[in-house]
Amino acid sequence: MDHLNSGYLQLGLFALAFGGLQIWWISSTLRKRDLARPLSEGEFRRSLERIWAKRT
């Protein structure tokens, strides 16, 4: 009977690890979505000015 309990323990640990990875993956994709937002007009203008300042 002890070997059944150890199997359930291993399955539970695997499920916890898998769930943790799922939560990490979902939160990282949501963070990337926040970073990929479009620039406002002022931010866009400043980024273009920085690019042109580097080239001259």
Image (cartoon, rainbow, N blue to C red):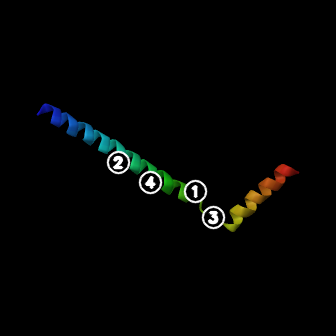
Residue with the mark numbered 1: 35
For marks 4 and 2, the one nearer the N-term is 2
**Furthest-bottom residue in this view:** 41
- Left or right position of 49 against 10: right
- Left or right position of 17 against 52: left
- The alpha-carbon separation of the residues under discs 2 and 1 comes to 25 Å
Residue 45 position within the rendered picture, expressed as x and y whole percent measured from the top left = 75, 63
User: Which residue is located at x 40 percent, y 50 percent?
Assistant: 22
- Left or right position of 11 against 20: left
Q: Is residue 3 above or below residue 39?
A: above
User: Which residue is located at x 83 percent, y 52 percent?
Assistant: 53
- The alpha-carbon separation of the residues under discs 4 and 3 comes to 21 Å
For marks 4 and 3, the one nearer the N-term is 4
Q: Are the two marked residues, 2 and 1, in contact with CB atoms closer than 8 angstroms?
A: no
- The alpha-carbon separation of the residues under discs 4 and 2 comes to 11 Å
Badge 3 amino acid: Pro
Helix, strand or loop under label 4: helix
Residue with the mark numbered 3: 38
Q: Quadrant of the N terminus?
A: top left
Residue with the mark numbered 2: 19
Badge 1 amino acid: Leu
For marks 2 and 1, the one nearer the N-term is 2
- The alpha-carbon separation of the residues under discs 4 and 1 comes to 15 Å
For marks 4 and 1, the one nearer the N-term is 4
- The answer to which quarter of the image holds residue 14 is top left
Give the label, 2 or 1, closer to the camera: 2
- Left or right position of 55 against 8: right
User: Which residue is located at x 74 percent, y 59 percent?
Assistant: 46
Residue with the mark numbered 4: 26
